[in-house]
Amino acid sequence: MKKFLNYLKKYNNIVWILLAIANFVLVIFILNSKLIKNTEPSFPTIDPSPTETVIQITKPVITQGSNSISPSPTESISNNSQQIPLFILSIFVNQKSQLYVYHPDGIPFTRLLNEPYEEIHPSVSHDQQKLAYSAKKNGYWDIFILDLKTGDETRVTDTPEYEGAPTWSSDGLFLAYESYKNGNLDIFIQDIVNLETQPIQLTNSNSPQFSPSWSPKGREIAYVSTLSGDEEIWLANLDSIENRFTKISDQPYQVDLNPKWSEDGEKLLWSSEKNGYPTIMMKDFSGSNQPITELGIGDSAIFTTAHLTYIQREANQNFLISKNLSDGLFAFPSISLPGNINGFDSLSNYEDKNFLQESIENNPVYFPDQQISGNIEIDKNKRVGLDSLTNVDTTFPFLNESVIANFNELRYKIASESGWDFLNQIERTFIPITEPATPGTAEEWLYTGRAFEFNPLSIHAGLTTTIKEERNGQTYWRIYIKSRYQDGSQGLPLKQMPFNLSARYNNDPLTYEAGGIRVPIPVGYWIDLTELALSFSWERLPAIGNWQKYFDSARFNQFVLTNGLDWYAAMKELYPVEAFKTPTPIPTNPLTPTISPTIRYFRSPTITSTPTETVIPTRRPTWTPIP
């Protein structure tokens, strides 16, 4: 035993080295088995169906890359629907707002008037014989009346100022409408029996007052006013003079728009922003002190004796929805609309209207599932290149070669509508993959060459304005461009208070934290850029979650043309996968061996060696000489 201990003492350092090598080999073996499983890099998560909308009341199932829809499993379609009326809608199709008729039972979207003019705000008379609307037939917006039996047309107004949103009196002898005079929207009443008489001005205020709706009972007109600082619903009593105007809705910081009476005049409906969506609100006047009730998600509702029909507005798509009042079921599946809606009405008796029947039989038809401009078929596996933009002031003036022609068409259309080349000084159209993306952006579309950002300085210059729209928990922006000529020949007056993003710099902490503030409706005529861009398939994107803190994260100035591609597929058009994939990070492994190995059950304990005795040298003795 003593010899064995002496042996260990002699080779103590060698034992420690052997144990360290064994421990090192064991660590490498375990790590290597784990790393083999993780050598394949991971890629960004892609939403498989980016165009599918998620809504609360009705969820149309949208086929990716098309406009076709089918009812969702939650939609219960009534088998015993009562007589569904014919719908007359002003739809923005092919860069124009024009009147279309539609019926879910065999009448697709068909032009009512086969003319090149723009037409908005259709309104059917109470006797179902005539249609009032606003049209731009001589270069300016005026009110017209169309006889649905004979096709005869009557011009009601003839001024350079804008006139729109006509509404009928119960006896059919008067029209109320909105007019933009002296830099402000007000409501006027016109005798249509004697058109030589001057219109009566119903409202007269420095605040815009618009969107009139005449009660079928004849003595009240509902409208929208910003007199109290927000868009609210007001009521004008025509039998009263001193206390004529009464505010119906009183919801600060909410947007109340588009009032519409029911056919019996007992109920007033309007839309109000609530929980991120336009919501249908109703005031019942059949009894005293009836509360305002909420009917559900929707906008521009029509309340007939048998149906509640409304528009459901998504971020980049609209739907026509109708429910039976008797059973609450859907009268027909949700209809995807081919463009933005600028007013609609219904017509219950339409078989005896000769002119209307001829229009349905002979005028052009637009199907909601036909492809819109710019939404072309592409090969998702084909690599494409970049093409140069001409006469554009930006750092990288390039776009994906499959969308550049569409962009040039949009640019030309904006210039012709607004009177100036808005997209000449563009912020960005493309950025190389080596450039940093907007903070907080998971998928930067500017890398794909399929997006553009207009110059944000146009907001500070007052040439563009933004309206905040909440859709499904996300913030979107509707952009308006100020027209060059403010004589009524270009654009329309605004009818909603903008959200001023630049106000965050006005030295107010509350405004800074909110990312901006709602401001009064600006004067002048404006072009709806969001509507115009969407007609060329350029869609807006939602703001990034940190937009209140970072101005660029609002993404109000970015539009994207996807052609049905998701971001991952669009990136593969320009780059190999290896250029933009995100590898899984591999942790650094500490391979330095520990000095003292750990005792494990499968190994004998390390023997503690006996310490070597160290001889303490004695000082050299000092010799004392002998005396």
Image: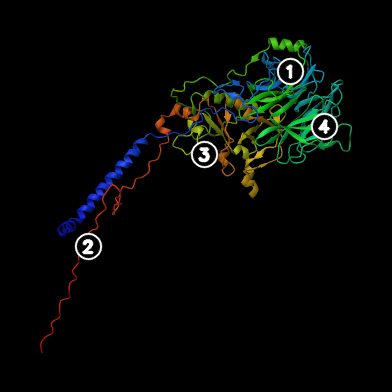
Within-10-Å neighbours for mark 3: few <14, some 14–19, many 20+ = some
Residue 254 visible from this viewpoint: yes
Of tags 1 and 4, the one toward the viewer is 1
Secondary structure beneath dot 4 equals: loop
Q: Quadrant of residue 455?
A: top right
Q: Position of residue 297 (x, y in %)?
A: 68, 31
Identify the amino acid type marked 4: Phe
Q: Label 1 to label 4, Cα distance in Å?
A: 26 Å
Q: Is residue 158 left or right of residue 456?
A: right
Mark 2, other Cα within 10 Å: few <14 / some 14–19 / many ≥20: few
Q: Which mark is residue 438?
A: 3
Amino acid type assigned to the residue bearing label 1 in the image: Gln
Q: Residue at x 62, y 22 (%)?
A: 71
Seen as rendered, the residue at the extreme bottom is 627
Depth order, front residue of 265/77: 77
Mark 4 highlights which residue? 285
Q: Earlier in the sequence, mark 2 or mark 4?
A: 4
Residue drawn at 62 percent across, 38 percent down: 459
Tell me the residue that label 2 is attached to.
611
Above or below 317: residue 14:
below
Disc 1: CA contacts within 10 A as few (<14), some (14-19) or many (>=20): few
Whether residue 183 can be seen here: no
Q: Secondary structure at mark 3?
A: loop
Nearer to me, 128 or 348: 348
* CB under 8 Å between discs 1 and 4: no
**Dot 4, how many residues are within 10 Å of its Cα: few (below 14), some (14-19), or many (20+)?**
few
Residue type at mark 2 is Pro
In the picture as drawn, the residue positioned furthest to the front comes out as 1
Tell which circle, 3 or 1, labels the residue nearer the N-terminal end. Answer: 1
Pointers 4 and 3 in contact (CB under 8 A)? no
Judge by depth and name the residue closer to the eye, 219 or 398: 219
